[in-house]
Image (spheres, helix red, strand yellow):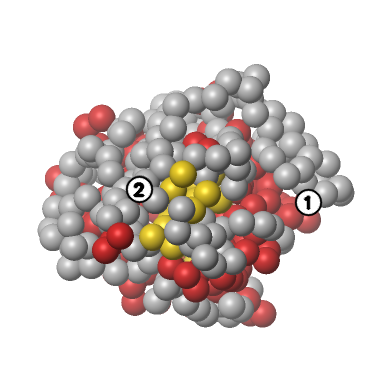
């Protein structure tokens, strides 16, 4: 990969905020603490993590690398889950390899990630030993907070330079022979009634078993470690941070693959009437959304309605190399009232 002038070290050192309280009231202070300001357009990236199909990953990495100059030119920010798996690792690698400078903000529950130096374990998944700010404190490179990981976990041979990856063809038109199956997604757990308030914590499909903590991705520029002990607790923070940072500029959620937690991310997004772009042919939750939008399958989330469908756009993964940059350029260049 080319050296990234925006990264001082191959193993990234990044400002980390530990916000407390409700997302809607805490994200503003947390963004100020890590030094990311708006208004600016925001892309929210969600989808497959460790289970992301290798063939899909091979197509996504050059796709994401091609978006880096556009995101820089638009002055955009990207928000995702911040761990070294799947779409998150791919976006980090793309930004690093293409020498991108846009803020890449990873948001993860404190109870699910390995605590960097200065963050102590606690009942809410971690508290800041340096906390003196309402947002929970901030850790900077000169305080030796380092997000470390040996590479692109869970992607095998995909941990290559973007220049060496050629797109691999996907057979069929979305659902044809060779297309990815919906059953590649994790088993769905019904979420909240969309007419009522969302519960504070995401449903846990594993019966309460606690998985080992994971590292943060080294190619992200900033992090929020938010209250929570399970994957999905970060979901409301993704949309809240995006809307706060956008400050009236456009926001868009891009969905590639994904399982139950991605469904939770999408539900929070649609509850805010935010726009969602699903990559058809990427598997899992993305393909479940596509099938529903095309009238081929029931909704992937209980209670989704036609009003929600109006906020979802579909793009074939095999055509995304040509179409996605143009689509994002239009979508993220608008202001919210023009969407």
Q: Position of residue 51 (x, y in %)?
A: 43, 29
Q: Of helix, strand and loop, which one carries label 1?
A: helix
Q: Residues within 10 Å of mark 1 (few under 14, many from 20)?
A: few
| Residue 257 x, y percent position in the rendering | 49, 38
Question: Which residue carries the number 1 mark?
Answer: 306
Q: Residue at image x 21%, y 44%?
A: 166
**Mark-to-mark CA distance, 2 and 1:** 47 Å
Number of marks drawn: 2
Give the residue displayed 23% in from the left and 67% down from the top: 6
The outermost residue toward the right is 195
Q: Position of 123 compared to 32: left or right? A: right
The quadrant the C terminus occupies is bottom right
Q: Give the quarter of the image for residue 170.
A: top left
- Residue sitting at 65 percent across and 29 percent down? 204
Q: Nearer the viewer, residue 2 or 286?
A: 2
- Is residue 7 among what the camera can see? yes
x%, y% of residue 324?
A: 42, 60
Ranked by sequence position, the earlier of labels 2 and 1 is 2
Name the residue located 86 percent from the left edge and 49 percent from the top edge. 195
x and y percent of residue 159 in the render? 22, 39
Label 2 Cα crowd, 10 Å radius (few <14 / some 14-19 / many 20+) = some
Left or right: residue 293 compared with residue 67: right
Q: Which residue is label 2 attached to? A: 117
- Taking 30 as reference, is 81 above or below it? above
């Amino acid at each position: 990969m080319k050296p990234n002038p925006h990264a001082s070290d191959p193993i990234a050192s990044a400002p980390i905020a530990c916000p407390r309280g409700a997302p809607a009231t805490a994200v503003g202070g947390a963004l100020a603490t890590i030094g990311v300001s708006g208004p600016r357009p925001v892309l929210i990236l969600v989808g497959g993590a460790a289970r992301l199909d290798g063939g899909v990953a091979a197509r996504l990495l050059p796709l994401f690398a091609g978006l880096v100059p556009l995101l820089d030119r638009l002055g955009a920010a990207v928000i995702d889950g911040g761990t070294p798996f799947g779409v998150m690792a791919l976006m980090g690698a793309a930004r690093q390899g293409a020498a991108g400078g846009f803020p890449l903000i990873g948001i993860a529950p404190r109870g699910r990630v390995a605590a960097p130096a200065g963050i102590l374990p606690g009942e809410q998944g971690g508290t800041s030993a340096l906390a003196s700010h309402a947002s929970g404190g901030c850790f900077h490179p000169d305080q030796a907070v380092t997000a470390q990981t040996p590479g692109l976990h869970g992607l095998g041979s995909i941990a290559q330079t973007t220049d060496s990856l050629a797109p691999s063809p996907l057979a069929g038109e979305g659902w044809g022979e060779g297309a990815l199956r919906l059953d590649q997604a994790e088993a769905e757990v019904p979420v909240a009634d969309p007419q009522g308030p969302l519960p504070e914590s995401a449903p846990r499909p594993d019966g309460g078993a606690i998985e080992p903590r994971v590292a943060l991705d080294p190619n992200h520029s900033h992090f929020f470690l938010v209250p929570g002990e399970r994957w999905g607790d970060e979901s409301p923070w993704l949309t809240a941070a995006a809307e706060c940072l956008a400050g009236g500029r456009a926001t868009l959620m891009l969905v590639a693959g994904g399982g139950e937690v991605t469904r939770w991310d999408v539900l929070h997004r649609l509850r805010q009437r935010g726009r969602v772009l699903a990559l058809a042919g990427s598997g899992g939750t993305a393909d479940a959304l596509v099938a529903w939008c095309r009238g081929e399958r029931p909704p992937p989330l209980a209670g989704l309605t036609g009003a929600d469908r109006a906020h979802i756009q579909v793009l074939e993964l095999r055509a995304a190399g040509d179409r996605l940059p143009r689509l994002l350029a239009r979508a993220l260049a608008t202001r919210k009232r023009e969407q």
